[in-house]
Image: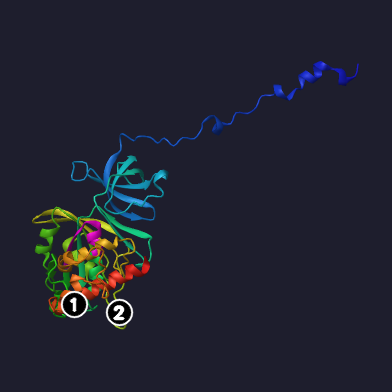
Amino acid sequence: MSWLDDDDDDEEFDETTLRSRPNPKANRPRTKRRPAHADAEVARVLGVDRGRYTVLADEDGPHERRVLATRARELRRMPIVTGDRARIVGDRSGDEGTLARIVGIEERTSLLRRSADDTDQVERVIVANADQMLIVVAAADPEPRARLVDRYLVAALDAGIRPLLVVTKTDLADPAVFLEHFDGLDLEVFTSRQDEMPLERIGARLSGHATVFVGHSGVGKSTLVNALVPSAMRATGHVNEVTGRGRHTSSSTVSLRYRGAAGSGWVIDTPGVRSFGLGHVDPAHILGAFTELALIAEDCPRGCTHLPDAPDCAIMEAAADGRLGPNGAARLDSLQRLLLTFAGSS
């Protein structure tokens, strides 16, 4: 008999009888369901450094400790910034060499953002959950920039944060003319000399709040932070004598605990910047930063642009009648520059 006629052999080598190797991945289909992490602990994000987050667990509790953490894979597209309230799991002992994991972010009460420029819709998140902004400018060396302060005010209003203003180096120049630009605003102002800082007055405003410090490079922001929080040891620099510009010293945003006679709070120090883009801001919020002009604008027709060619604009009529005064005219010019920028980028 030929081997071709051997039905038994055909059956013996039928490949359908061979066992196949199981595929573990196919046997465990992927799912979007994530662990609930019911045992997660909420901690304050103090700083970020190369993908590692320093967080404060059990804040003001008997087991307060600093913990180093990384973010969970599912949060890779979410910005986690200083001031965030993060949910952490894993090794939360804070011991050297340990690493916890951030698995979620609590709802934020505020979010301070900026963009590269006014036409850039890509925003950069600076800090979360701050309720105050302390704007630091110098009376001289470098010269104060009123329009940069206007931008800070708009960003603060957009974020729902209360602005404060401190003018440093008042022993070098009188800031009176500069401060006239902000007459009529609900803005508390502090003045500071290089040899005498109003630490108690400023500290009283920091108590019970999370305050983000912002300012142009070289204005003395880090010096002020070090005076308020002696353990901060933030790097300080000087102003270039040729360019008149400050040198960047603080390179990261960090939360520091303030303890004063009036109580404790949080100081959030940010790197000095020379520009502050508002591409992310709702243009409707710009006028609100100019309190005294916003009151006059209540008599404007619906849809008024408040620009020089706007018909029946109450602000322009007040300017023509001399009711704004010299300081009001400068404020109007600053407002219109911002409005024109946004009108050109829309």
- Residue closest to the eye, 110 or 316: 316
Does any portion of residue 171 appear in the rendered image? no
The percent coordinates of residue 118 (x first, y second) are 34, 67
Residue under numbered circle 2: 240
- Specify the amino acid type for callout 1: Ala
The percent coordinates of residue 77 (x first, y second) are 41, 50
Colouring chosen for the image of the structure: rainbow
- Residue closest to the eye, 234 or 340: 340
Residue, x 44% and y 37% (percent of image)?
32
Looking at the image, the residue that sits furthest to the bottom is 242
Q: Which residues are magenta?
A: 154-165
Residue, x 66% and y 24% (percent of image)?
19
The percent coordinates of residue 21 (x first, y second) are 63, 28
Q: Mark number for residue 329?
A: 1
- Specify the amino acid type for callout 2: Asn
Q: Quadrant of residue 60?
A: top left
The C terminus sits in image quarter? bottom left
Q: Mark number for residue 211?
A: none
Mark 2 or mark 1, which has the lower sequence index?
Answer: 2
